[in-house]
Image (cartoon, grey):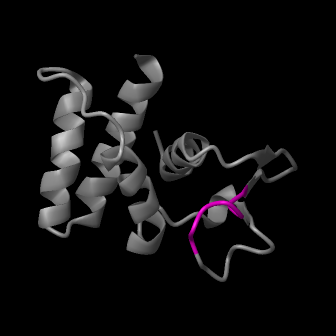
């Protein structure tokens, strides 16, 4: 998956409603992200910054960490704890990658 596909996966995980236009827009008015690319709550998919901004990624991490921990020895369990470890390393790229792995696991369970 590319960055846009991964960011779309995250937006859908956050339940951000989508308005399909030539370039899809998502409603982030109920999500606490402040950024100049968000206009009246709406942001184009191509402007999402989950992959490069802690301000964008942390609400996703918070939602995941507030969920029930997955059972041991599942892909979700490995991704969940990898997110925690990567946060300790302050590594946004690895955290972003594991967030996407967790969401893929969560959507398929």
Classify residue 70 by image quadrant.
Answer: top left
Position in image of residue 32 (x %, y %): 57, 68
Q: Residue reaching furthest right? A: 21
Q: Is residue 103 above or below residue 84?
A: above
2 magenta-colored? no
Q: Which residues are magenta?
A: 27-33
Position in image of residue 68 (x %, y %): 31, 34
Label total for image: 0
Q: Is residue 20 above or below residue 35?
A: above
Q: Residue at x 45, y 73 (%)?
A: 55
Residue 73 in the figure: left or right of residue 109: left
30 magenta-colored? yes
Q: Residue at x 28, y 45 (%)?
A: 98
Q: Is residue 68 above or below residue 53?
A: above
Residue 81 in the figure: left or right of residue 25: left
Instruction: Judge by depth and name the residue closer to the eye, 81 or 94.
Output: 81
Q: Residue at x 36, y 54 (%)?
A: 61
Residue 12 in the figure: left or right of residue 90: right
Q: Residue reaching furthest bottom? A: 36
Position in image of residue 34 (x %, y %): 59, 78
Image quadrant in which the C terminus is located: top left
Q: For the stretch drawn in magenta, what is the main secondary structure?
A: loop
Q: Residue at x 13, y 65 (%)?
A: 88
């Amino acid at each position: 998956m590319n960055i846009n596909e991964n960011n779309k996966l995250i937006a859908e995980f956050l339940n951000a409603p989508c308005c399909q236009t030539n370039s899809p827009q998502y409603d982030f008015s109920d999500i606490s992200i402040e950024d100049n690319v968000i206009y009246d709550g709406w942001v184009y998919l191509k402007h999402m910054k989950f992959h490069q901004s802690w301000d964008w990624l942390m609400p996703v991490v918070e939602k995941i960490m507030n969920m029930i921990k997955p059972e041991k020895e599942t892909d979700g369990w490995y991704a969940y704890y990898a997110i925690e470890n990567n946060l300790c390393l302050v590594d946004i790229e690895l955290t972003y990658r594991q967030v996407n792995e967790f969401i893929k696991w969560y959507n398929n369970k």
